[in-house]
Amino acid sequence: QVQLVESGGGLVQAGGSLRLSCAASGRIFSFTMGWYRQAPGKQRELVARITGGGTTNYADSVKGRFIISRDNVKNTVYLQMNSLKPEDTAVYYCNALLSVYDYWGQGTQVTVSS
Protein backbone atom coordinates (compact mmCIF):
# COMPACT_ATOMS: atom_id res chain seq x y z
CA GLN A 1 0.00 0.00 0.00
CA VAL A 2 1.29 3.43 -0.98
CA GLN A 3 -0.16 6.56 0.56
CA LEU A 4 0.07 9.79 -1.38
CA VAL A 5 -0.14 13.24 0.19
CA GLU A 6 -0.45 16.32 -1.99
CA SER A 7 0.52 19.80 -0.92
CA GLY A 8 1.21 23.21 -2.42
CA GLY A 9 -2.24 24.19 -3.58
CA GLY A 10 -3.76 27.57 -2.88
CA LEU A 11 -5.12 30.78 -4.31
CA VAL A 12 -3.11 32.57 -6.99
CA GLN A 13 -3.78 35.32 -9.49
CA ALA A 14 -3.89 34.59 -13.20
CA GLY A 15 -0.38 34.54 -14.62
CA GLY A 16 1.09 33.33 -11.36
CA SER A 17 2.80 30.08 -10.44
CA LEU A 18 2.37 27.25 -7.98
CA ARG A 19 4.35 24.13 -7.27
CA LEU A 20 2.48 21.05 -6.16
CA SER A 21 4.18 18.21 -4.34
CA CYS A 22 3.08 14.62 -3.88
CA ALA A 23 4.88 12.70 -1.15
CA ALA A 24 4.60 8.93 -1.22
CA SER A 25 4.87 6.68 1.81
CA GLY A 26 6.77 4.02 -0.12
CA ARG A 27 9.20 3.59 -2.95
CA ILE A 28 7.75 4.81 -6.23
CA PHE A 29 10.63 4.42 -8.67
CA SER A 30 8.74 1.79 -10.71
CA PHE A 31 5.43 3.60 -10.69
CA THR A 32 4.05 5.84 -13.36
CA MET A 33 3.12 8.98 -11.46
CA GLY A 34 0.42 11.32 -12.63
CA TRP A 35 -1.32 14.52 -11.75
CA TYR A 36 -5.03 14.73 -12.47
CA ARG A 37 -7.53 17.47 -11.83
CA GLN A 38 -11.25 17.79 -11.39
CA ALA A 39 -13.15 21.02 -11.71
CA PRO A 40 -16.69 21.41 -10.33
CA GLY A 41 -19.19 19.66 -12.55
CA LYS A 42 -16.51 18.13 -14.73
CA GLN A 43 -14.84 14.76 -15.02
CA ARG A 44 -11.42 14.11 -13.63
CA GLU A 45 -8.80 14.61 -16.33
CA LEU A 46 -5.14 13.82 -16.77
CA VAL A 47 -2.88 16.85 -16.46
CA ALA A 48 0.58 15.29 -16.67
CA ARG A 49 2.25 11.94 -16.25
CA ILE A 50 5.80 10.69 -15.81
CA THR A 51 6.95 7.10 -16.12
CA GLY A 52 9.54 5.39 -13.99
CA GLY A 53 12.02 6.00 -16.81
CA GLY A 54 11.25 9.70 -16.91
CA THR A 55 9.08 9.89 -20.01
CA THR A 56 6.51 12.63 -19.68
CA ASN A 57 3.28 13.54 -21.36
CA TYR A 58 0.92 16.45 -20.84
CA ALA A 59 -2.61 17.47 -21.57
CA ASP A 60 -2.71 19.87 -24.51
CA SER A 61 -4.20 22.54 -22.26
CA VAL A 62 -1.10 22.69 -20.05
CA LYS A 63 1.74 22.02 -22.52
CA GLY A 64 4.41 24.66 -22.28
CA ARG A 65 3.10 25.89 -18.91
CA PHE A 66 3.31 22.90 -16.54
CA ILE A 67 6.27 20.66 -15.79
CA ILE A 68 6.09 17.32 -14.02
CA SER A 69 9.16 15.89 -12.33
CA ARG A 70 10.05 13.23 -9.83
CA ASP A 71 12.62 12.58 -7.14
CA ASN A 72 12.83 8.84 -6.54
CA VAL A 73 15.14 9.32 -3.57
CA LYS A 74 12.61 11.48 -1.79
CA ASN A 75 9.68 9.48 -3.21
CA THR A 76 8.12 12.73 -4.31
CA VAL A 77 6.55 13.99 -7.51
CA TYR A 78 6.18 17.65 -8.39
CA LEU A 79 4.03 19.71 -10.69
CA GLN A 80 5.38 23.14 -11.50
CA MET A 81 2.51 25.24 -12.80
CA ASN A 82 3.31 28.51 -14.54
CA SER A 83 1.21 31.09 -16.35
CA LEU A 84 -1.84 29.89 -14.50
CA LYS A 85 -5.27 30.61 -15.92
CA PRO A 86 -8.69 30.71 -14.24
CA GLU A 87 -9.59 27.54 -16.14
CA ASP A 88 -6.83 25.73 -14.24
CA THR A 89 -8.96 26.02 -11.11
CA ALA A 90 -9.64 22.51 -9.81
CA VAL A 91 -8.79 19.94 -7.20
CA TYR A 92 -5.50 18.37 -8.20
CA TYR A 93 -4.90 14.71 -7.42
CA CYS A 94 -1.73 12.67 -7.42
CA ASN A 95 -1.82 9.13 -8.79
CA ALA A 96 0.61 6.22 -8.64
CA LEU A 97 0.09 3.39 -11.12
CA LEU A 98 1.91 0.10 -11.51
CA SER A 99 0.11 -2.87 -13.04
CA VAL A 100 -2.91 -3.54 -10.80
CA TYR A 101 -1.69 -1.12 -8.15
CA ASP A 102 -3.50 2.19 -8.46
CA TYR A 103 -3.22 4.73 -5.65
CA TRP A 104 -4.70 8.21 -5.24
CA GLY A 105 -4.07 11.10 -2.93
CA GLN A 106 -6.77 13.14 -1.25
CA GLY A 107 -6.31 16.14 -3.52
CA THR A 108 -5.27 19.75 -3.14
CA GLN A 109 -7.30 22.76 -4.22
CA VAL A 110 -5.89 25.18 -6.76
CA THR A 111 -7.84 28.36 -7.36
CA VAL A 112 -6.78 30.88 -9.99
CA SER A 113 -8.43 34.28 -9.81
CA SER A 114 -8.83 36.52 -12.83
Image (cartoon, grey):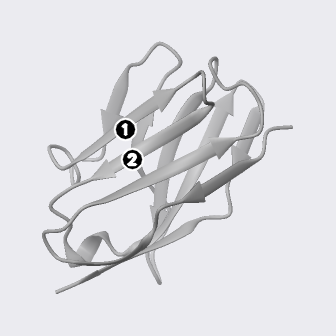
Q: Given the image, on which type of amino acid does mark 2 rest?
A: Leu
10 Å crowding of disc 1: few (<14), some (14-19), many (20+): many
As drawn, which residue projects farthest toward the top? Answer: 53
- As helix, strand or loop, the secondary structure at mark 1 comes to strand
Pointer 2 with pointer 1, Cβ within 8 A: yes
Q: Nearer the viewer, residue 31 or 78?
A: 78
Quadrant of the rendering where the N terminus is positioned? top right
Q: What whole-number distance in Å separates the C-alpha atoms at marks 2 and 1?
A: 5 Å
Q: Position of residue 55 (x, y in %)?
A: 38, 20
As drawn, which residue projects farthest toward the right? Answer: 1
Q: Nearer the viewer, residue 101 or 82?
A: 82
Q: Which residue is mark 2?
A: 79
Q: Position of residue 52 (x, y in %)?
A: 53, 18
Rendered image quadrant of residue 114: bottom left
Say whether residue 48 is left or right of residue 83. Answer: right
**Which residue sits at x=51%, y=27%?**
71
Rendered image quadrant of residue 112: bottom left
As drawn, which residue projects farthest toward the front? Answer: 74
- As helix, strand or loop, the secondary structure at mark 2 comes to strand
Q: Position of residue 110 (x, y in %)?
A: 41, 72
Q: Position of residue 5 (x, y in %)?
A: 67, 54
Q: Which residue is mark 1?
A: 68
Say whether residue 25 is left or right of residue 44. Answer: right
Q: Is residue 106 above or below residue 60?
A: below
Say whether residue 1 is left or right of residue 98. Answer: right
Q: Is residue 94 above or below residue 114?
A: above
**Which residue sits at x=77%, y=39%?**
25
Q: Is residue 63 above or below residue 74?
A: below
